[in-house]
Image: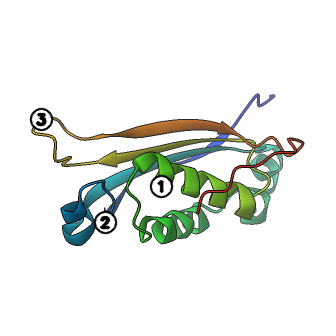
Amino acid sequence: MMITSGKVCIENMRFYARHGVMPQEQVVGGDFLVTLRAEVDMNRAMESDDIADTLNYAALYKLVEHEMTIPSKLLEHVAGRIAQAVFESFPQVTSLDVKVIKKNPPMGADCAGAGVELHLINNKTHVETTVFK
């Protein structure tokens, strides 16, 4: 058996946070969903059955939880900060999908939510880096 790729996934983490362009959104806050898919080499974990050989999704959750406590106007900024923190904390992640959804966006639309989804590559050889603060 040969694995071609593997991802550690956490689906629809729920957070109450204060993200939004409108001042009231940063005062009142709202409900958000965050989904992560982190690509890592899972060959050793498949053999060893040892958490040290994979990503600990509890640690990933704590990282996302922390980033969600920092108010931002744009969800792109929130997703970028989450990605930056994942790549800094877990250099074994080769690519990452981050999805941040605001469950009740104040735009007068009848929808389940609105947000952003990013696909990022951890290019460790790239000289220029973007820092989200």
Q: Which x, y percent locates residue 84?
A: 65, 55
Considering the numbered disc 2 on the image, is that residue within a helix, a strand or a loop? loop
Q: Secondary structure at mark 3?
A: loop
Report the quarter where the C terminus lies.
Answer: bottom right
Which residue is rendered at x = 16% and y = 35% of the image? 111
Of the image marks 3 and 2, the number of the one nearer the N terminus: 2
Is the residue marked by circle 3 packed among few (<14), some (14-19), or many (20+) residues within 10 Å?
A: few
Label 2 sits on what residue type?
Answer: Arg
* Residue placed under numbered mark 2 in the picture: 18
> Is 38 rendered above or below residue 30?
above
The residue identified by callout 3 is 109
Question: Residue 59 location in percent, x, y?
Answer: 60, 68
Disc 3/disc 1 C-alpha distance (Å): 22 Å
Earlier along the polypeptide chain: callout 3 or callout 1?
1
Is residue 130 something one can see in this rendering?
A: yes
State the residue at coordinates (23%, 63%). 23
**Residue at (72% x, 64% y) in the render:** 89
In the depicted structure, whether residue 2 falls above or below residue 17: above
Quadrant position of the N terminus in the picture: top right
Q: Amino acid at mark 1?
A: Val
Residue with the mark numbered 1? 78
